[in-house]
Image (cartoon, rainbow, N blue to C red):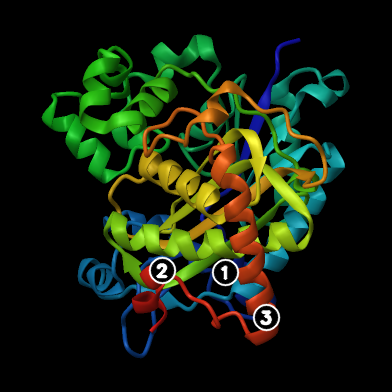
Amino acid sequence: MDRVFFHIDVNSAFLSWSALEKLHNGSALDLRTIPSVIGGDMAKRHGVVLAKSIPAKAYGIVTGEPIVNALRKCPSLTLEPPDHKLYHRRSRELMTLLSDFCPDIEQVSVDECYMDYTPIASRYPSPEAAAHLIKDRVFKELEFTVNVGISDRKVLAKMASDFRKPNLVHTLYSYEIQRKLWPLPLSSLFMCGRSSAETLRKLEILTIGDLANTDRSILAAHLKSHGLLLWEYANGIDASEIVTEQSEAKGIGNSTTLSKDAADKETAHRVLLSLAESVARRLRDSGQATGMVSTEIKYNTFRKVSHQTTLLSPTSQTDAIYQIACSLFDEIWDGTPVRLLGIRSSKLTSEREPVQMSLFDLDPPPLPQAARYTSPKPPSSRKKEQLEQALDTIRKRYGADAVVRGSLLKERS
C-alpha cells in the first residue's frame, strides 16, 4: 500500500491540561467551558496568549496576541498561568499511549506528533478506523481530546489535523487537495505566515488554490525559495519521512531562547554563529562530523518551523555549519520576530572515516541561495581545522570565553 501518515494534535493543549489539573485538585470550574486563556501574568496583566478556550475564541481572541488586547475584547476573561512541568508530564503520557499503537513516532512539539500508519495497516480495517480508535482511547484514558489528520504526505496530514476541531478525524489525501485544500485562505497553509500572506495578497493571490496555480517564477521573484516551498505545499508536494526520536538522539544540537525577540536577519545570524560554534566544538570533541544540518525557528507567536539539508561532504567546521544554518534560516524566515533559534546536526560519521569528495568540493559554497552545500575547499580546509583545534585547546584550558569572535563581542556584552 501507499505510505500513510497521521498527524496527532492536542486540542488547546495547555488550556486543556491546566483545566484537567484544576478539576483533579477539586475545582468546580472547568476552564474549557468559560472564556479563559493560558499565559501572561495575572497581577501585572502582561504577556501573550499561549492557549485559549472555545468560548474565548468566540470573542476574537487569538493565540500569540498580548494579554492586554485579549482583556479588552473580553473584560471577564479568566487568566491562568502556564505550568510547563505539568505540560511535559502530560506530553509524556500521550507519547507513551501512542507508542502502544506504533513505535514510529516523530514528536515535533510538546502537543503534536507524526505517526507512520503504514507498518500497522494490517491491524485495522482502514486508516480512519485506526485514527478514531486513537483519539477515543486518548479521551478515555487521558481525558483530553486530539485531532488526527490522515494523508499520504506529512504536510497534508498536518493541515488536515487543523481542520474543524475538537476531537475529530480528517483526511487530506493528494487526490483531495483541489476539493478540500484549494478553497481555503492562505492562512490555512502550513508555513505561510502573516508576512508571506500579505506579500501574496498584494499579488492578488488569496487562496491556497490561487497559490497552487501561480507561476513559480513569480513566487521566486517575490518570496525566493520560501515561495517555492509554499507552492509545493499548496500542491501537496512533500517527500519527508518520519524521523523517530531514536534517530534524533544520534545528532548534536543546541538552541537558545533569546532575551529579546530578533526582528532582523543580522541579529539572527549573530545568534546562529554562536550556536554553530557550540555545535561544531561538540562535534570535534566527540570526534565526529555531520552530514546533515538543520535550523530551527520558534517565532514570538510560539509557532515552530525548521529546515534541513544534506551535505555533500561531512564537516565539523564552524564556518561551514554557520553558513549552512544562515542559508536555511534565510529560506524559511517569514519576517515574524524570532524568540528561539536552534541548530542540529545529524547523520554523524567518525572524523577518521575517509570522505568521498565531489567536484563541488573544489570551490567554496555559494551563499546564501545555494541549493546544496559542501565543506570549504581542501587547500584551506586543513588550516581551518588546525586553527579550530588550537582555539578548542585554549578554551578548554582557560575557559569558553578566553577567545571570542569579534562579531560576537557586542552580543555577549
Q: Secondary structure at mark 3?
A: loop
Horizontal arrangement in the rendering, residue 302 relative to residue 45 (left or right): right
> 130 or 267, which lies in front?
267
Tell me the quarter of the image containing the N terminus. Answer: top right
Q: Position of residue 22 (x, y in %)?
A: 61, 76
Identify the element where label 2 is drawn: strand
What secondary structure is marked by label 1?
Answer: helix
Give the amino acid at mark 1: Ala
Q: How many marks?
A: 3
At 54% from the left edge and 23% from the top edge, which residue is drawn?
Answer: 238
Q: Give the labeled residue for mark 3.
A: 25
Question: Quick check: can you spot residue 15?
Answer: no
Packing grade of label 1 (10 A; few <14, some 14-19, many >=20) is many
For residue 397, side relative to residue 191 (left or right) = right
Image quadrant in which you'd find residue 121: top right
Q: Which of the labelled discs sits on residue 36, or is there none?
A: 2
- On the image, numbered disc 1 is attached to which residue? 19
Q: Are marks 1 and 2 in contact (CB under 8 Å)?
A: yes
